[in-house]
Amino acid sequence: MSVKVVADNYLRADSVDEFIVAARELVAETHAKDWGCFAYGLFRDTADPLHLTVLEEWENQEALDAHLASEHFQRLFPVFGATADPAKPGVVSVYEPV
């Protein structure tokens, strides 16, 4: 059963560029290396330039778990926390079809 992930990130104004560089690398590495990835992309909220979201679709939970354990995710994910707005923490939601 496929799973979809919505990873909302709310950034400090001084850290947007750093976040985008890391997120773009994560997107590229994920597309190149992670099995079971149907979609993985970075998007900016048109109403709030400090709100960036990664939208993902995975073949199953096993594929998502493998991605979360991957070298590139483990290396790049800490940048997301370091660039976050402490007053507005990010939210990751995982969805399955019903």
Image (spheres, rainbow, N blue to C red):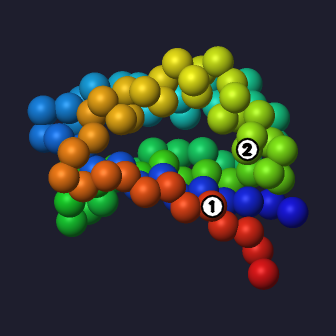
Amino acid type indicated by mark 1? Val
Question: Could you say which disc has been placed on residue 64 in the image?
Answer: 2
Residue positioned most to the bottom:
98
**Do the CB atoms of the residues marked 2 and 1 lie less than 8 Å apart?**
yes
Q: Which residue is drawn at 12% across and 33% down?
A: 14
Q: Where is residue 73 in the image (x, y as percent from the top left)?
A: 58, 27
Label 2 crowd bin: few (<14), some (14–19), many (20+), radius 10 Å: many
| Sooner in the amino-acid sequence: mark 2 or mark 1 | 2
- Please say whether residue 24 is visible from this viewpoint: no
Amino acid type indicated by mark 2? Leu
Disc 1, SS: strand
Direction from residue 86 to residue 30 in the image, left or right: right
Direction from residue 39 to residue 50 in the image, left or right: left
Q: Rounded to the nearest whole Å, what is the CA distance between mark 2 and mark 1?
A: 10 Å
Residue 29 falls in which quadrant of the image?
Answer: top right
Read off the residue under disc 1. Answer: 94
Q: In which quarter of the image is the N terminus?
A: bottom right
